[in-house]
Image: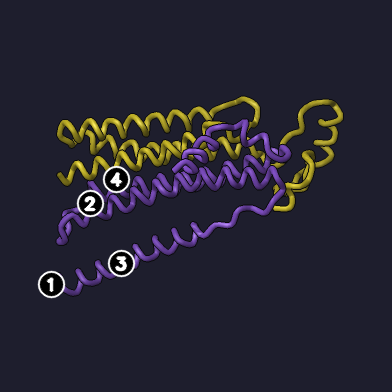
Amino acid sequence: MGDVWESIRRWFDPRELRSVGNTPDYRFSLANERTFLAWLRTALALVAGGLAVAQFLPPLPLRHLREAMAIALLLLGGAVAIRAVDHWARTERAIRLGEELPASRFPAVLALAVGLGALLLVVAVLLRAVGGR
Amino acid sequence: MSRARRPPGPVPGPEPPSGPTGRAGRGAASAAGRPLPDPGLQPERTRLAWRRTGFSVTVVAVLALRIALASDLAGALLAALTVLASGGLLLLCWWRGTGTGPARSGGRTLPLAGVGTAALALLAVLVVLRGVW
């Protein structure tokens, strides 16, 4: 738990980040910032999707399934946002130190989760189309 | 990202092909002691990225507002907090998106935006849970 607070403190301390390595060409830092913002928009889209599911979807046959879907989307959005900050800080550090950029499995995991969710929805729609009449 | 190792200066980084005002123009500006014009318009692109993010926040804020208007008292309080959080996030994105100061990346705004988005997601989870009870 202490490690978590330590890394959160580090995110908010620009001096700490600037103390390592050399100041890179600012264009690299700005590109890193735009990548972070693209992830943040992904997170916001997931949050918006969760809020939309919660209020626009009609009640589903399974009890609280709608709310469960909304909460899953919202939590996924929150996780994407936190991971975006962490990845931005680690990338900035790597750029300053001239190291390899941090590798991450997160994009693949997120893509699989979204793909799986879409597949489940397709199955649900097909089942409804077949059994509904 | 071996380019990060290079010293700052006119780095042949990823940039659109320069037109007539390309390298010759920049050399002249540098010789005259003025700041180098940025070939990739990086600060502008970064500001626009902040504005796009602001638009995404607006969508979330509107959806949260709709929930807030339709809730009971306790739910409305939670939803109002969500609306306030998204409003703060919007101000943050607006501030960074219209800043005309020198090109600076990072700082505290960036982790604040990420953590704010995650907080927004958690508040929205509470709002949805409140709707179930």
The disc, 2 or 3, on the residue closer to the chain's N-terminal end is: 2
Q: Which residue is mark 3?
A: A120
Q: Residue at x 34, y 62 (%)?
A: A117
Q: Tell me: residue A66, above or below residue B102.
A: below
CA–CA distance in space, label 2 to label 3 = 16 Å
Q: Which residue is mark 2?
A: A67
Q: Residue lying farthest bottom?
A: A130
Quadrant housing the C terminus of chain A: bottom left
Q: Residue at x 29, y 50 (%)?
A: A71
Is residue B21 at all visible to an observer of this figure?
A: no
Question: What label sits on residue A133 in the rendered view?
Answer: 1
Q: Position of residue A41 (x, y in %)?
A: 45, 45
The disc, 4 or 2, on the residue closer to the chain's N-terminal end is: 4
Q: Residues within 10 Å of mark 4 (few under 14, many from 20)?
A: many
The disc, 4 or 3, on the residue closer to the chain's N-terminal end is: 4
Q: Does A119 sit left or right of B43 as displayed?
A: left
Q: Amino acid at mark 1?
A: Arg
Question: What label sits on residue B36 in the rendered view?
Answer: none
Q: Residue at x 45, y 45 (%)?
A: A81
Q: Residues within 10 Å of mark 3 (few under 14, many from 20)?
A: few
| Chain letter of the residue beneath label 3 in the structure image | A
The disc, 2 or 1, on the residue closer to the chain's N-terminal end is: 2
The letter of the purple chain is A
